Amino acid sequence: MAYFLKKISLIAFCLALMLAVSTAQAQQPARTFLLTVPLSGPLERMGHQAKAGAELALKTWGGGFNLEIADEAAAPREDLDFSSVAIALGYFTESRFQLDAPKFLYLRKPVLLPYLTTAEPASRGPATFFRLMPTYAEQGEYLALELLNLNRRPRRILIIEGRAGGQAELVAALTQTLADPPQPTPPPPPEKDKRAPKAPAPVKPLDSKALILTVDPDQAMKPGEIQELAKENPDIIILALGLDDALRLAPVLAESKWAKTPLWSGTILGFREIGSAYTALNLNLSLCLPVTNLAKSAGNKEVQRFKDKYAASWHTQPTWISALAYDGLTLAIRAVSSGESPSETLAYLIGENRYALGTYDLVPGGGGRPPLDMMQVKSETVGFLP
């Protein structure tokens, strides 16, 4: 009987030990990040740039963490254990994101989305999906505010607008903001015995007498049309175009009286093919791009360190694609390192975060204000475009 009781006690002890070990393992925070980017197919080049940016972030900040990489252009990997992932990031295509999103929702895993330019994916999973890329509407608002902040406001604006949805969103936000710009937030009331902070000056809308013309690229390329439009002598031209239209339009612009007129656009044209073509034709193109401007990093030590480390590791310049992946994984590593529980990780993500190349302000609905900056496209800055 005593032998039997000892055996029962030994079995009970082993079971209790196994349960304690499994519980301790379950309580340990996951140490793996999942990056999903296209490593084959038409977006392969950008996918490898994103991979390089993420790997540099892991090398810089990620002691004790692992990075798992999935090819977004290939069939989903059956061997991936989503439950062991702390935070996922990446996704260039909404179709692949939609395929994986239910798994992250079910497991309550945060996902950082550096490349999707629509707010819709983030809104599908409050406190789960966080957008790091500015939407086209946010880019349009940013361009409008930049126009309103010029020392000499434009009197004539020409907008060449394509037919795609993102291009229309940019133009709609641009024109709306020019007419009714958002006003700065008033300062908080002063503390006792302290002087009240100065209220920021209100932003005045564009003069009602200013002329805004909108044409489509086919109209702009008709024989004689460019000369007719040039009579309006625009101060600035907004290009809300796809890559093909922008390339077709470049020689027409170069041969017109607008060759020296400032051309502005957003990430729609933020690629090396466009930059090289417009630079070769001596066109004055500037783009609003996400993250702190890599091309003018002299005053930003964090950006300069990133550029130096990236060049040392990969023997090339970082692009804004690689910078977004670097920022995404940097935020993920900081978030997981901030505490032991998933709630502490989320608390870190939701709120202003300055541990990246730009300042990200994420909210539970996945929105926020991803940073934007202007970059003039020249021969020496084309290398920062993907």
Image (cartoon, rainbow, N blue to C red):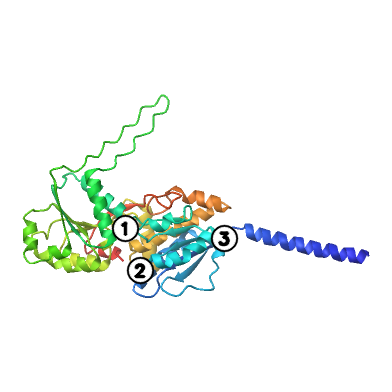
Give neighbour class at mark 3: few <14, some 14-19, many 20+ (Cα, 10 Å): some
Q: Nearer the viewer, mark 1 or mark 3?
A: 3
The residue at 64%/61% (across/down) is 25
Q: For the C terminus, give its image quadrant.
A: bottom left
C-alpha distance separating marks 3 and 2 = 28 Å
Residue under numbered circle 1: 294
- Say which mark, if any, is on residue 46: 2
Query: In terms of image quadrants, where is residue 75?
Result: bottom left
Residue 144 location (% of width, % of height): 24, 49
C-alpha distance separating marks 1 and 3 = 32 Å
**If you read the primary sequence from the N terminus, does the residue marked by circle 2 or circle 1 appear first?**
2
Give neighbour class at mark 1: few <14, some 14-19, many 20+ (Cα, 10 Å): many
Asked if residue 15 shows in the view, the reply is yes
Q: Is residue 133 left or right of residue 377?
A: right
Question: In the image, what residue type sits under mark 3?
Answer: Ala
Asked if residue 281 shows in the view, the reply is no
Q: Secondary structure at mark 2?
A: helix
Q: Is residue 344 left or right of residue 328?
A: right
C-alpha distance separating marks 2 and 1 = 17 Å
